[in-house]
Every structure is written in structure tokens, then in C-alpha cells.
Image: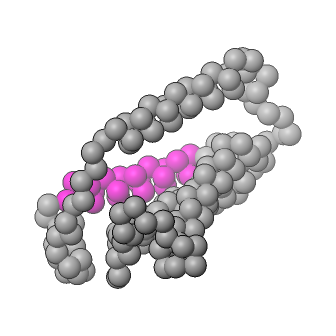
Amino acid sequence: MQILACQPGAVPSLFSAEGVVGIIFLLTVALVVTGALIAVSAKRLVRAVAGLAVCFTGLAGVYYFLLSPFLAMMQMLIYVGAVSILIAFGIMMATPEEQQTMGMKNRSALAGPLACSVGALLFAALTMIAVKTQWQVVTRQGAGDIKAMGMALLTKYAFVFELISVILLLAIIGALVLAQRGRN
């Protein structure tokens, strides 16, 4: 994989390799934001899960741009391929309820503005932290071969590897609970 680096102080042209890579990166970030907005604003649960899958797909693209193709592949396999599809099948196996929105009647009028203000404050705080932090370039360790990565997953990062399997187990149990509640 070739690493593209811009010269300090130079603005890359739109038609250069750096410009095209920047546009593709912005498109993947837009995919993440669009999928997240669909996931939180959809009125139907199936559309919300589709938005979640789109968000996870864009996040895999961001991982790829962070020079971690293995993590991007795992994102696609675990979250898009397993968790999102499992939730979608759980929703589809459940019998549809009446056409009423449960819980929407008791919502406070301040819930939306309060959530937006908390989100804006969090975004501002994270932006200030990102701007004020002195970011250091980390040298890449190892060649990224699959054998070394497998050994690291099963020795040094075994806990994280097992934690991913617990997340998958919880997703399976959640889908089964959704399906069982819908049938009763």
C-alpha cells in the first residue's frame, strides 16, 4: 500500500493523487454521517438498521484510510455482515405490531433541543481537544503480515478478540429475544 503525503504548506490540486484521496475520504465520512442520520431519524426499524449498516460500511472505509485494512475487513465482516444482518432478521422474524408509535406520546418538548445542545457541546469540546493536541507521527511497526497479526490476536490481544465474540453473542441473543417477543 502506497502512503501519500502532502508537502507542508502546499495545497494539493483537486486532480492530483492527494486531492482525489481527500475527496474519497470526505465521501466515506459523509457516508458515515448519512448512515448515522438515517439510523437515528428513521421511523421504521428496518430502515434504521439499514442506516446503521451504511454507517458501519463508511466506518470500514475510514479504517482503511487509517492504514488498517484488517480492521476495515473485520468491521465489514462482524458489524455489517453479522450484527446488522442479524438485527434485521430478528426484526423481520418478529410479527408486526399495530400501527402505533409506542412511547412517542410521552416525549418531552425539550428532548430534541436538549439532545442537540449536548451533541453540539460534545462536538465543540472534541474539536478543541483535536486542535490543541500536538499530534505525533507514529512509525509503522512490522510489515502487517497475516501470520504476525494472527499470533498477536491470539496472544497479546486475546482479550479483545474474545470481547468481539461476546458482542456477537449478545447480538444473537438480542435478535432471538426480539423474535420471541414478536411471536407472543
79 over 16 or under it: above or below: above
The residue lying furthest to the front in this view is 9
Q: Is residue 93 above or below residue 110?
A: below
Residue at screen point 35% across, 63% down: 8
Residue at screen point 61% across, 60% down? 31
x, y percent for residue 85: 58, 63
Closer to the camera in the image, 88 or 80: 80
The picture quadrant where one finds residue 87 is bottom right
Across the whole image, how many numbered discs are drawn on residues?
0
Of 133 and 35, which appears nearest the observer? 133
One can see residue 94 in this view: no
**Residue positioned 42% across, 35% down in the render:** 128
- Residue 25 position, x and y percent, is 52, 65
Q: Residue 18: x and y, percent?
A: 47, 74
Magenta residues span: 157-177
Tell whether position 158 is magenta: yes
Q: How is the image coloured?
A: one colour
User: Can residue 125 be seen from the camera position used here?
Assistant: yes
x and y percent of residue 7 in the render? 36, 69
Q: Is the magenta stretch mostly helix, strand or loop?
A: helix
**Residue 171 falls left or right of residue 50:** left
| Vertical position of residue 132 compared to residue 95: above or below | above
- In the displayed image of the protein, which residue is found farthest to the left? 155
Q: Which of 158 and 112 is in front in this view?
A: 112
